[in-house]
Image (cartoon, grey):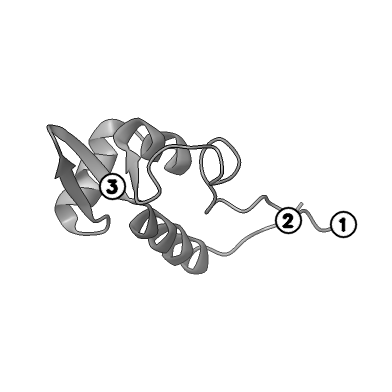
Amino acid sequence: MATTTAQRTTCVCGGCTCGGDPLFYDIPDVMRILGISKKSVEKLISSGDLDSTLVLTRRKVYRQSVSDYLARSESATPVTTC
């Protein structure tokens, strides 16, 4: 029996019609989407794996960058089913 996973490229709250910025994720959103710590998100930003910018005084990560990172990581790791 094969298992299916939900698409991980949608907004955190289940779809991009939920509001928020259409171009950027906040750092806490990226942490939830990727399931990693703030320090790990900062490492991905500094290594260039995630594109970010400063909006006012807050660091924002481009949504497309997160989607691209997820696509790269999913294609690099084989999916196993039980």
Q: Residue at x 56, y 50 (%)?
A: 8
Q: Identify residue for label 2.
A: 81
Q: CA distance from mark 3 to mark 1?
A: 37 Å
Residue 65 relative to residue 18: left or right? left
- Give the camera-side residue of 25 and 37: 25
Q: Is residue 16 above or below residue 77?
A: above
- Give the camera-side residue of 23 and 51: 23
Q: Is residue 64 above or below residue 19?
A: below
| Residue 1, position as x, y percentages in the image | 87, 57
| Residue 29, position as x, y percentages in the image | 40, 35
Residue 37 relative to residue 48: left or right? right
Q: Earlier in the sequence, mark 2 or mark 3?
A: 3
Q: Nearer the viewer, mark 3 or mark 1?
A: 3
Q: Identify residue for label 1.
A: 1
Residue 81 relative to residue 19: left or right? right
Quarter location, residue 30:
top left
Quarter location, residue 64:
bottom left
Q: Residue at x 37, y 42 (%)?
A: 21
Q: Identify residue for label 3.
A: 61
User: Judging from the image, what secondary structure is the residue with disc 1 in?
Assistant: loop
Q: Residue at x 40, y 49 (%)?
A: 22
| Residue 60, position as x, y percentages in the image | 25, 42
Q: Amino acid at mark 3?
A: Val
Callout 2–callout 1 Cβ contact below 8 Å: yes
| Residue 47, position as x, y percentages in the image | 17, 56
